Image: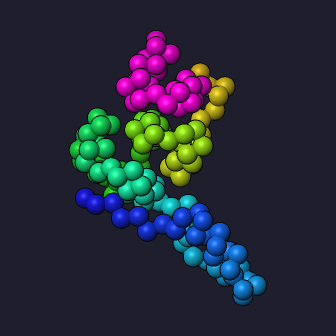
Amino acid sequence: MECMAEVKSTEELIHQIKENRSGGLSFLDGADYHCPPTAIYLCELLTERGMEVRSTIQALGLDRSYGYQIFNGTRRPTRNILIRLAFLLGLDLDQTNRLLKIGRKEVLYPRIRRDAAVIFALERKMSLEQLDALLEETDG
């Protein structure tokens, strides 16, 4: 399975808005002004980082069919899977919260003990394995 990202970048959207000479807001009717579907956004992130779906599914330790269903859009990933993906992809806190919003999950909230540990790990650029160890310590 190949990821094909068809989503315009933020810079392209800003340029389109600035160059709009019609004076109306009809340009907002396009699909570009909605959050991309989670699967498309995930594929865009993988493409940007030169990663493959198959190896990502393996690195996350997901069942093969479940993983492919997430990346082809037939299943929605859990919040935990999105957080694990954020670490695998090397996202920062803002990028992780964007991923969670697009996936229709709650953003990380520092007053929640587990979320605070995730934020701590993100800020220190910990690996997925280090995150797992930290969360096991935090939950235990």
Q: Residue 30's image quarter? A: bottom right
Residue at coordinates 33% horizontally, 60% vertically from top-left? 3
Q: How is the image coloured?
A: rainbow
Residue 99 placement (x, y as % from top left): 52, 47
Residue nearest the observer in this picture, 88 or 38: 88
Q: Is residue 51 left or right of residue 104?
A: left
Q: Is residue 121 left or right of residue 110?
A: left
Q: Is residue 134 magenta?
A: yes
Q: Is residue 95 magenta?
A: no
75 shown above or below 93: below
The residue at the far right in this view is 23
Q: Residue 106's image quarter? A: top right
Q: Which residues are magenta?
A: 116-140
Residue at coordinates 57% horizontally, 25% vertically from top-left? 120
Residue 13 placement (x, y as % from top left): 61, 70
Residue at coordinates 53% horizontally, 27% vertically from top-left? 124
Q: Is residue 66 visible?
A: no
Residue nearest the observer in this picture, 29 or 96: 96
Q: Main secondary structure of the magenta part?
A: helix
Residue nearest the observer in this picture, 82 or 66: 82
Residue 28 placement (x, y as % from top left): 64, 75
